[in-house]
Amino acid sequence: MAHAAPRSRVRDERAGTPDIFSAQAHRIARFALPVVLGLVYGYWAAANRRYGGPITGWNLLFGFLTALAFIVLYLAVQWLAPRMKREVHAALWGAFTAASVGFLVSTTNYSVLWSMWLGLASGAGLTALLFYRFHSREDAAGHRRA
């Protein structure tokens, strides 16, 4: 008869994927990701606003101010969200996504109602996805599992 091979307790205790990056790489990525995403977001908003016309100084200023606002808000949500319960944590990221998508769509020729509905749909979708993710990775007391 065949029997299952015994499992190592060390392997059972550290279930999950291995972390291949160093702590320094994680610290750099924690601030580099919002900056890169903010620059892409600012460029996208500025490109939407100029409607294919020439690049002007006001357009560049709008893009950089939009990028700065995105970066500041992203870092605020990144700092604040993990301190909340899982429901609020997911809702905070969903609200940030809804506002970001809604603003980006509002810089185009579409109506304000379309930007509102698209922002709400994307925010609700992300909130549901993150709630499931946080709910499935925490115990009943709200402590994160490995």
Image (tube, rainbow, N blue to C red):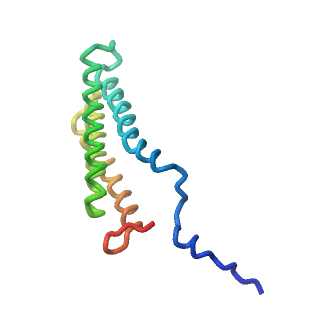
| Image side of residue 120 versus residue 30, left or right | left
Residues 42 and 142: in front is 142
**Total of numbered circles in the picture?**
0
Say which residue appears at 27% left-offset and 64% top-offset.
85
Identify the residue at the far left of this view. Answer: 112
Q: Quadrant of residue 73?
A: top left
Say which residue appears at 42% left-offset and 43% top-offset.
29
In the rendered image of this protein, does residue 114 appear above or below residue 127? Answer: above
Q: In what quadrant of the picture does the C terminus appear? A: bottom left
In the rendered image of this protein, does residue 14 appear above or below residue 105? Answer: below
Q: Quadrant of residue 8?
A: bottom right
Q: In what quadrant of the picture does the N terminus appear? A: bottom right
Say which residue appears at 57% left-offset and 72% top-offset.
10
Residue 42: x and y in percent read 32, 29
Residue 138: x and y in percent read 38, 68
Residue 134: x and y in percent read 37, 62
Residues 75 and 100: in front is 75
Residues 77 and 115: in front is 77
Identify the residue at the far bottom of this view. Answer: 1
Residue 48: x and y in percent read 32, 25
Say which residue appears at 24% left-offset and 42% top-offset.
116
